[in-house]
Amino acid sequence: MTTPGFWASAWLVFQKDLRIEVRTREIVTTAGFFAVLVTVMSSVAFPSSNETAGGALWIPIAFASILALGRTWQRERDDGAMTALLVSPIPRAAIFVGKALGVLAFMLAIEVVLVPLVALFFHIDLLPVLGPLVVMLVLGTVGVAGMGTLFGAMTVRTRARDLMLATVLFPLLSPMLLSGVSGTTRLFQGEAGLAAVRDYIVLLGVFDGVAVIGGIAIFGALVEE
Amino acid sequence: MTITLRQVTKTFGPVRALLGVSMEIRPGEALSVLGANGSGKSTLLSVLGTLAKPTTGTLDHGPLGRTREEVRRVLGWVGHDLLTYADLTGRENVTLAARLHGLDPSTAYAAVAERFELGAFAERAVRTYSRGQRQRIALARALVALPKLLLLDEPTTGLDAKGVAKLGEVVREEVARGAYVVVVTHDAEFARAYGDRSVEMERGRIRN
C-alpha cells in the first residue's frame, strides 16, 4: 500500500468535487444564475458602455465565488465528510489544491456564460480582446479560488460562516478585483493586446502566487492542530 | 507494542478537555471509553486519531508509526456522523477512501462489499439510505484499508438492536484480527457486551 503522492491526492479531491457537482449541478446552477441576474441588473442600472462593462463582469464573479465557496465547504461539513479526509494519509496541502481546483473549474464554467452575456449587454466586440481577457479571467479566478478556499476552510466551522467568509474575503480580494476591473476596462476600451494590460496581469500573477503558496503553506495549520 | 498516553492534557483556550490522562491500549483489545457529555471522551479520540495534538504530555502510537502521516495510513475512524458525501454513491465513497490510502479501488471494494453485504443499494446516492445501510457504508469506508487502529465515536447512536449487534460483531472481528480498537460510547451495555476493558472519564480525567 503506497499512499498517493501530492498531485495524485489533489486530483482525487478535485475529481470527487467535480463528480458531486456534475451529479447535483448545485454550485454552477445557483451561483451561475445569481451571476447572470447581477449582470442583467447591471446592464439596466449602468450606462451600456465599454467603461462600465469591466465592473459588470467582475462584480458577479466576486459574488458568485462566495456562493460557490460556501457550498463547496458546506459539502465537507455535512455528515462530517471533512473528518474522513483529515484522517486519511494524504498531505493537507493536497486537500487545499484539490478543493481550489474544484472552485476554479466551477467559476470558469460560470464565466464561460457570463463573458458573452456582458459583451452582449454592453456592446463589446470580444474577438479582438479575447486572448488577454481569458488570461486576466483565469489569473483572477485562480486568485479567488486560492484565497477563497483558504478562508473557506477557516470559516466553515464558524456559526455565521457565509457572512464571515464574505466579510473576510472581500477586503483580501480587493487588490485582485481592482486589477481585474481596471485591466478589463482598458481592454474593452480598445487597448487590445497583452502589452496594454501587462501591469495588471503581473499584479494578478503576484496575487495568485501569494494565494496559492500561502494556501499550500497555511492550510494544514488551519484544518488541524 | 502498546499505544501509550502519559499525562496527556488538552486545552482549548480556557476549556480544559483532558487533564493528565495516562493509559495503554493493547493490540487485539477493544477498549471502551465511557463517560457523560463533556467528560473529554471525544477529545481523547481526536488526540488518538491525530486530529488534535496534546497540549502537554506524550502520546506514543508504538508500532503504528512515529509521525501523524504514518499513523493515518493505518487509521480507521467511525463517527456518529457518516463521514461520507451524501451525493456520491456508497461505492464511490468507499472507493474514494481506498484511493486515498493508495489501494486498488476494485479489489478493496470487493472485499468490503462482501463483508458488509453492500448490495444494489451501494450504487445509489448515500442520501437515500436507511440508517442500517448508512452504518454498513460507514463501516466499509472505515475498514476498507484494514486499519490497525480503529476508533469509533458513539457508533451505536440511532441504531436498532440488529444494527448494534452487527456493529459488535465487527468490533470483535477487528479485535480478532489484532487491531487496536477504541470505542467512545454512552452505551455501557455495548461496552460490556463487546469490549474487553473499559475506562470511565469524568471532567477530563480517567476515573478508574
Image (tube, coloured by chain):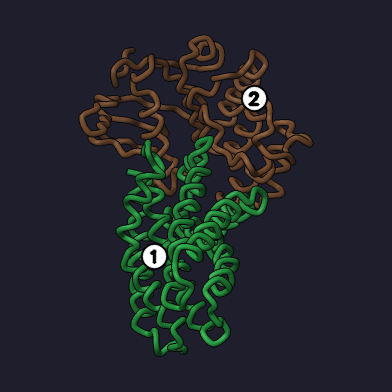
| Residue at x-position 63% and y-position 35% | B140
Q: Is residue A61 visible?
A: no
Measured from the top left, where is residue A46 in percent x and y?
Answer: 44, 67
Which of the chains bears the disc numbered 2?
B
Q: With B17 as the anchor, is A151 left or right in this view?
A: right
Residue B131: numbered disc: 2
Q: Report crowding for label 2: few under 14, some 14 to 19, many 20 or more residues within 10 A (C-alpha).
A: few
| Residue at x-position 56% and y-position 82% | A125
Q: Is residue A43 visible?
A: yes
Q: With A61 as the anchor, is B108 left or right in this view?
A: right
Res A13 → quadrant = bottom right
| Residue at x-position 48% and y-position 11% | B188
Measured from the top left, where is residue B1 in percent x and y?
Answer: 42, 34
Measured from the top left, where is residue A225 in percent x and y?
Answer: 32, 43
Question: In the image, what residue type sits under mark 2?
Answer: Arg
Which one of the lettered chains is coloured brown?
B
Nearest the camera: A110 or B39?
A110
State whether residue A185 is above or below residue B186.
Answer: below
Say which colour chain A has: green
Question: In the image, what residue type sits under mark 1?
Answer: Val
What's the CA distance linking mark 1 and mark 2? 40 Å
Res B158 → quadrant = top right
Residue A212: numbered disc: 1
Nearest the camera: B198 or B37?
B37
Nearest the camera: A30 or A165?
A30
| Residue at x-position 79% and y-position 36% | B120
Nearest the camera: B191 or A133?
A133
